[in-house]
């Protein structure tokens, strides 16, 4: 993970196109960052190299594994019928129900056969450009630590349950796996254009909080939804939030909420649709047209929107998290 807040973690989109004003770097080794590109200062722990990878996964206690098992069991009460098919299939393909925090090496072996991805351990935060570089090489950086029982219901920083349970099953889907790699490549481009915030919004509204149409319903594919029981119900069923079909130009101008349930979710038709809307377009041109800040509030419905459900926003109008408002 990188340091764009929980969202950071995101990334985005766009491939090498013949029209690129500046070519993509060679991602085989960590590319040099131009001196005029802003990178948030993060002090690298002395035992880590330039790749910020931990030498090995944490040795978890029995209680750590118990926390994972209890989180897993709780989500399995909620996700059938609310999580997309690719996610549920990914849980099976990776045998994540066998109990205990998964071993990254074994997960990586299984992912390698399916889509060529691996899972690598990192400290809580890593720099954005390093995070993007790992994605561009089909390595998913996952946090080592797991939440405690005291923070069982809500944590600000993603832990191994969010990262592995929420994100990794989706990497078994070939199209989604390609999207994530391209997001990493696009991250470097966004940094050169100083439009990382816009790319972060795309990550937020797809990789973290994305919904997809399936069988005449909306279901979740975003890890921020899939790793928590309240948001899984809220995103898919509640009357409060807007549900709007994804429009990349609009989403990259849209603010988002980090510390509460989302006022708006964006919906894709398919992962092929997501890929086409992002990877198959000229992000150089898009970045040049984007303002440096966000244009639209996180609850706004605007005239270009293809709206599936216009939300009541009751939950947030009543005060949201900490107010006692029900997530209806
Ligand atoms: Fe995440």
Image: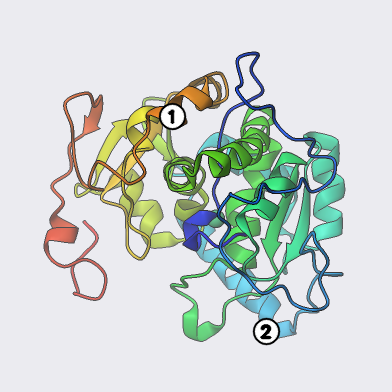
Relative side of 196 to 252, left or right: right
Q: Which mark is residue 82?
A: none
| Labels 2 and 1: the sequence-earlier one | 2
Residue pictured at 61% horizontal, 65% vertical: 161
Q: Is residue 22 above or below residue 184?
A: above
Query: Which residue, given by chain and number where applicable, does mark 2 sit on?
Result: 63
Q: CA distance from mark 2 to mark 1?
A: 50 Å
Q: Residue at the location (48% across, 49% down)?
A: 208
Instruction: Indicate left or right for 66 with 242 as reference.
Output: right
Q: Nearer the viewer, residue 320 or 128?
A: 128
Ligand 1's quadrant is bottom right
Q: Mark 2: which secondary structure?
A: helix
* Label 1 within 8 A of ligand 1 by Cβ: no
Residue 10 image point, x, y percent: 54, 48
> Disc number at residue 288?
1
Q: Identify the image quadrant of the N terminus.
A: bottom right
The answer to whether residue 155 is seen in the rendering is yes
Position of residue 280 measured from the top left corner of the image (x, y, whole percent): 56, 18
Q: If the image is split into quadrants, where does the C terminus sit?
A: bottom left
The correct choice, above or below, for 143 with respect to 309 in the image is: below
């Amino acid at each position: 993970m990188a340091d764009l807040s929980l969202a950071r973690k995101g990334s985005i989109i766009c491939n090498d196109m013949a029209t690129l004003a500046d070519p993509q770097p060679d991602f085989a080794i960590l590319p040099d960052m131009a001196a005029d590109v802003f990178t948030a200062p993060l002090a690298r722990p002395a035992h880590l190299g330039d790749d910020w990878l931990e030498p090995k996964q944490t040795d978890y206690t029995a209680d750590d594994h118990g926390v994972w098992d209890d989180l897993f069991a709780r989500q399995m009460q909620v996700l059938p019928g609310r999580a997309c098919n690719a996610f549920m299939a990914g849980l099976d393909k990776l045998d994540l129900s066998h109990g205990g925090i998964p071993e990254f090496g074994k997960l990586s072996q299984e992912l390698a056969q399916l889509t060529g991805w691996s899972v690598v351990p990192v400290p809580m935060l890593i720099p954005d450009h390093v995070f993007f570089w790992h994605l561009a090489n089909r390595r998913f950086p996952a946090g080592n630590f797991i939440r405690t029982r005291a923070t069982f219901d809500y944590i600000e920083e993603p832990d191994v349950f969010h990262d592995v349970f929420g994100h990794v099953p989706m990497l078994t889907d070939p199209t989604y796996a390609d999207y994530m790699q391209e997001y990493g490549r696009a991250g470097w481009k966004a940094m050169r254009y100083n439009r990382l915030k816009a790319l972060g919004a795309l990550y937020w509204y797809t990789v973290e909080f994305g919904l997809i149409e399936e069988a005449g319903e909306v279901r979740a594919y975003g890890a921020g939804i899939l790793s928590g029981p309240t948001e899984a119900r809220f995103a898919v069923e509640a009357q409060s939030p807007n549900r709007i079909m994804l429009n990349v130009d609009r989403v990259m101008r849209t603010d988002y909420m980090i510390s509460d349930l989302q006022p708006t979710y964006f919906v894709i038709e398919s992962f092929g649709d997501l890929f086409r809307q992002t990877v198959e377009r000229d992000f150089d041109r898009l970045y040049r047209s984007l303002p440096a800040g966000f244009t639209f509030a996180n609850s706004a419905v605007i005239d270009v929107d293809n709206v599936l459900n216009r939300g009541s926003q009751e939950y947030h109008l009543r005060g949201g998290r900490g107010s006692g408002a029900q997530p209806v």
